[in-house]
Amino acid sequence: MTEQRTRWGILATGGIAAAFTADLVDLPDAEVVAVASRGEEPARAFAERFGIPRAYGSWKDLAEDADIDVVYVATPHAAHRTAAGLCLEAGRNVLCEKPFTLNLRQAEELVALARGHGRFLMEAMWMYCNPLVRRLKALVDDGAIGEVRTVQADFGLAGPFPPSHRLRDPRLGGGALLDLGVYPVSFAQLLLGEPSDVTARAVLSAEGVDLQTGALLSWDGGALAQVHCSITGGTATCASITGSRGRIDVPSGFFHPERFVLHRDGREPEEFTADPADGPRTSLRHEALEVMRALRAGETESPLVPLDGTLAVMRTLDTIRERIGVRYPGEAGDPDAGRAEVPVPA
């Protein structure tokens, strides 16, 4: 890393890679120096679009580029273990999109690789880096609503999604839970930590992925969280945290909120709004800023998105999938385990 700038590599060229790169190029301390796809043509097109000097037709070439300080892995999550692992083994630091991996085993392997090589690794859980979400968490941690009793959060998309769509494809880790449910689960665990017990129900597709899932998470101290995700109906994406002395409501878009309302017993409601200086609510810049801050400080993980917290969320997602009976090709318990090949788009 140069003294002034962090040099980024972008691995994959899909929609989320484009959104992240568009935010990166507006940051004065960031420089996007290379992009890779599984083919040279999409890599070159992406490079031309964003003025990136180097385009690679293979992930390996990007991973071995020593001029890159950190790689942003933006593939579908079925390929995160392979892509992020390739970069870590080559000595690169990594920001890996969420959900971190398909399952806890893969997540543990990536964390072990990062720690073994002394490299920085972070899940791109942009919600945790959002300034207004951080303000909400600080209020909860400071006891603004007393002891947390319940958390409720939902995330659903209306669809309909055909069986050929990636959200319906088991080989790509399809279903509502990993793509959308990771948000309400991560929100609950941001506030309460890892649950002690998990129950869940789901409606499954003909392909064997979850179309919608509801889960009840519980903690030994008596707290409960109700979380819901769906790819069959658009939900309000609301969240609410109830404590022994008050409540916080996030009216919509809880993972990138414009505002939330604090209700304290015996006091008038207080509204907290996003600072326009922090950029659009859809901005991914805050996770990039956290990565660059951590790299400059010589840290190998972020206190905002700690690896142990990422592993805890993956453990909960695994447990929910076990409860609802969703297994992906190649996983233990799948009849074709070890024989499946995962098609991963660029």
Image (cartoon, grey):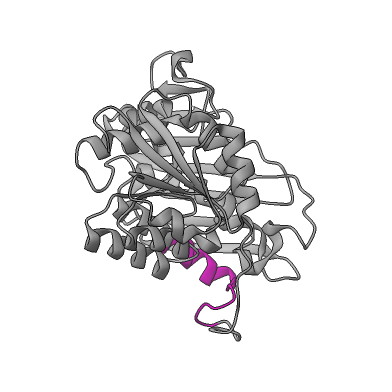
Residue 117 x %, y %: 24, 60
Farthest residue, direction front: 53
Q: Is residue 143 visible?
A: yes
Q: Quadrant of residue 312?
A: bottom left
Residue drawn at (28%, 65%), measured in percent from left and top? 112
Query: Residue 228, relative to residue 163: is it above or below?
Result: above
Residue drawn at (57%, 36%), measured in percent from left and top? 19
Is 153 situated left or right of 305 in this image? right
- Of residues 244 and 236, the one nearer the viewer is 236
Residue drawn at (33%, 60%), measured in percent from left and top? 90
Query: Residue 182, relative to residue 203: is it above or below?
Result: above
Q: Count the labels in the image.
A: 0
Farthest residue, direction left: 298
Residue drawn at (28%, 30%), measured in percent from left and top? 143
Say if the magenta span includes residue 48.
Answer: no
Q: Is residue 195 visible?
A: no
Say if the magenta span includes residue 325.
Answer: yes
Residue 277 x %, y %: 44, 14
Boundaries of the magenta span: 315-333
Which quarter of the rendered picture does the N terminus lie within?
A: top left
Query: Residue 55, relative to residue 132: is it above or below?
Result: below
Residue 63 x %, y %: 40, 56
Query: Residue 287, relative to residue 259: is it above or below?
Result: below
Q: Quadrant of residue 219?
A: bottom left
